[in-house]
Image: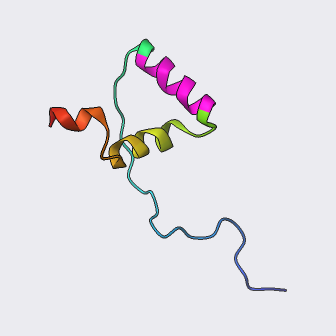
Amino acid sequence: MSSKKMGRPPFDKPKRKTIEIRVDEETMSKLDASAEKLNTSRSAIVRKGIESNNSMWFHFI
């Protein structure tokens, strides 16, 4: 038998941290609609927004 491990390959930057935020129904609906339209996850959208230098919310910091 092979001694190779089964499962997903390791990531360069494993995502070990989690956050929990509060949002209203409208915001959650927008996030869900965006995730469905882009065929991605809520988390991926939030990460992309944080990483983007063009995000509007950076103007408030």
Q: Position of residue 20 (x, y in %)?
A: 36, 35
The residue under the point 34% across, 24% down is 22
Q: Position of residue 54 (x, y in %)?
A: 31, 41
Q: Is residue 4 left or right of residue 42?
A: right
Q: Is residue 36 above or below residue 55?
A: above
Number of marks in the image?
0
Query: Which corner quadrant of the image does residue 41 belong to?
Result: top right
Q: Is residue 58 left or right of residue 51?
A: left
Query: Which corner quadrant of the image does residue 39 belong to?
Result: top right
The residue under the point 69% across, 66% down is 7
The residue under the point 41% across, 19% down is 27
Q: Is residue 29 above or below residue 21?
A: above
Q: Residue furthest right?
A: 1
Q: How is the image coloured?
A: rainbow
Q: Nearer the viewer, residue 9 or 3?
A: 9
In the image, residue 32 lies in the stretch drawn in magenta: yes
Q: Residue furthest front?
A: 54
Q: Which residues are magenta?
A: 27-37
Q: Nearer the viewer, residue 59 or 13?
A: 59
Magenta span: predominant SS is helix
Q: Is residue 56 above or below residue 24?
A: below
Q: Position of residue 28 (x, y in %)?
A: 46, 21
Q: Is residue 51 left or right of residue 6?
A: left
Q: Residue furthest left?
A: 61
Q: Position of residue 47 (x, y in %)?
A: 41, 45
Q: Nearer the viewer, residue 2 or 61?
A: 61
In the image, residue 31 lies in the stretch drawn in magenta: yes
Q: The C terminus appears in which quarter of the rendering?
A: top left
Q: The N terminus appears in which quarter of the rendering?
A: bottom right
